[in-house]
Amino acid sequence: MDAETIRKLIESGLPDARADVRGDDGVHFEATVVCAAFAGKLPLARHRMVYATLGDLMGGAIHALQLKTVTPDESP
């Protein structure tokens, strides 16, 4: 697994999202995901939305994914 593949999966699963994914060892990654659909949602709900784009890869090919999820208004 690589960061670019994860980025593409997130952005295709959340069409208005912009994702920045990093990870060098192939199993541990961190991502910042900016998406308008996160508005009004608690962090756990936002994370679940991202995990849903990755499906069975979570806990398998992707051992760990540290997430920061923000709306465009919350983005620096």
Image: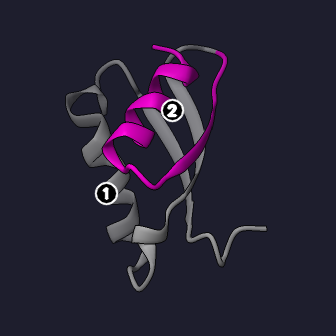
Q: Is residue 15 magenta?
A: yes
Where does residue 17 sit, x and y in percent of width and height? 49, 53
Identify the residue under disc 2.
7
Q: Are marks 2 and 1 in contact (CB under 8 Å)?
A: no
First to last magenta residue range: 1-24
In the image, residue 10 above or below residue 8? below
Identify the residue under disc 1.
49
10 Å crowding of disc 1: few (<14), some (14-19), many (20+): some
- Taking depth in this image into account, of 25 and 3 the one nearest to the observer is 3
**Secondary structure of the residue carrying numbered label 2:** helix
Where does residue 67 sit, x and y in percent of width and height? 53, 52
**Residue at (45% x, 13% y) in the render:** 1
Q: Is residue 5 magenta?
A: yes
In the image, residue 21 above or below residue 60? below
Q: Quadrant of the C terminus?
A: bottom right
Where does residue 75 sit, x and y in percent of width and height? 70, 68
